[in-house]
Image (tube, grey):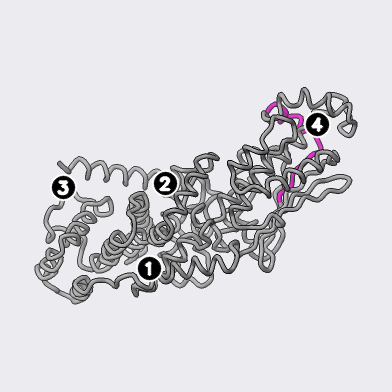
Amino acid sequence: MIESIELASRFEKGEEVSISFQYVSREIDIALNSLLAKALARLDMLFFYETLEAILREVVQNAVKANMKRVWFESHGLDIQSNEDYAEGMRSFKEIAYHPHFLKDTLLESDYRVVVTMQKLDAAISLKVINNARIVPHELERIHERIAEADQCESFSEAFDKLHDDAEGAGLGIILVVMLVKNAGLDTSVLRVETDESSVTFSLTIPFQIKPANLRTSIKKRILDDVATLPTIPEHILKIQALCRIPDSPIQAITELIARDPSLTAEVLKIANSAGFITSRRITKVNEAVIVIGMNNLNAILYAVAMRKILNMRYRKFEAVWVHCNRVAFYARRIALRASLSGLEEPAFVAGLLHDMGKIVLLATSPELIDQIADMASSRKIRASSMIEELFIGVSHAEIGGLVAEQWNFPDDLVEAVRFHHAPLKPAIRHRDLVMAVYLANELAHVPARELHEAYFEHEVMAHFGIRTPLDLEELYAELWDRYESQERMMRNSYP
């Protein structure tokens, strides 16, 4: 198994790192994707992950296919540089071209390899895919033609309608790569195909600032202006928080203030009945909810309650985001408890509830743009996600969340947990225990959408929480999943 963690650390230092292979096995696929995720996280560019992963996948497949073609021709005694032999060999190769497993053993016995390299430059990422096979002149010509043709298209649908054909070398993968680059706001000049007598190199240079400065500035200004006009935390919630901080404050005074606000009452009861607070029965009274939550915990949780109330009033409701946040909150609290991090359990729970609040602001900034992205993703079978949406807008939800937290004068530890929940190793982090707990909880909460594998997690974070082996990680995930699902089922059954 290739150590993507070590490679990511070397990448961060500016070293060129590489992964070499002959066939894309499961281990190679995981290594490539985890290195990509870790490298982008260190640059606060995770929103570019899905696009870059799709580009890398297409280019790697093309490189492996090119090597497959060479071993096929050689095994049949054909000269790939001969026009006559090429035509003959392609007639039979086309039947297996999209079934690489048929030639796996032959590839592994050959001298053909693919090397993927990554390097952090001063203002960009250099990504290269190199295969040690001499290219046929008309193949190279076809690649350049497809790049130029796709560059003239305005959309995925236009490109595939105009350029799709069934001929070998039609270059559908190249078309997809070009359109992904264009839709990311990059000029196709960042793509280069270089050849020599023994190899072909496909290179992509991705600037740290993906969007043009004027576009990024205008969109970011719109978001910042919007954040600046968000209402402050209501006065009565601030009064409740002040009472919570006073030793021996009467519960009755606090419950009376909560009860005056029906929406606040509903949120407090909802949290008291959530999986984060294990109870044997449904809580229906505010005073019971305050007792279950606890005075100190209530003070922190009121940040989340106020935030949800304000954001839901201002923006479209994104229920899936809140559902995910609830799970992360539960996971983060359990992770802190397991690690015996005294006093961190409730801040971890609250930080989990808050960590994706920037996503709400971001996704609501331009609903028409989000709808357009979703339509494009659906038509091209590309999974739509907040990362794709961020890619089009040019600002990360973690960055926006941090700005919102600062706007509302949240405690420094909560601000950091929100801002760095995808990048727990940033040197500027002071409240590292909390940030790491929320990072780990968030990553584990995303597991149902992808494979659970230690290569996708930051090694330093796993070690911090005593996760030494893949089995440790699997057991932690199973424990958190089972506890959360069990508590959710119990709470659902307790409701009429």
- Local crowd at mark 1 within 10 Å, few (<14), some, or many (≥20)? many
Q: Amino acid at mark 3?
A: Arg
The local crowd at label 2, few if under 14, some if 14 to 19, many if 20 or more residues have their Cα within 10 Å, is some
Residue to which mark 4 is pinned: 71
Q: Position of residue 445 (x, y in %)?
A: 41, 49
Q: CA distance from mark 1 to mark 2?
A: 24 Å
- Residue span colored magenta: 101-116
- Of badges 4 and 3, the one in the foreground is 4
Which circle's residue, 3 or 1, is located before the other in the chain? 3
The residue that appears at 37% across and 54% down in the rendered structure is: 328
Gap in angstroms between the C-alphas marked 3 and 1: 30 Å
Q: Regarding mark 4 in the picture, which secondary structure is present there?
A: helix
Where residue 51 sits: x, y (%)?
58, 50
Mark 4 or 3, nearer chain start? 4
Amino acid carrying label 1: it is Leu
Name the kind of residue labelled 4 in the image: Val
Q: Nearer the viewer, mark 3 or mark 1?
A: 1
Between 368 and 202, the residue placed more toward the observer is 368
The residue carrying mark 3 is: 281
Q: Where does label 2 land, which residue?
A: 477
Q: Which residue is mark 1?
A: 414
Which quadrant of the rendered structure holds the C terminus?
A: top left
Q: Does label 2 or label 3 sit earlier along the sequence?
A: 3
The numbered disc on residue 50 is: none
User: Is the residue under label 3 in contact with that under label 4 (CB below 8 Å)?
Assistant: no
Mark 2 residue type: Tyr
Circles 1 and 2 in contact, beta carbons < 8 Å: no
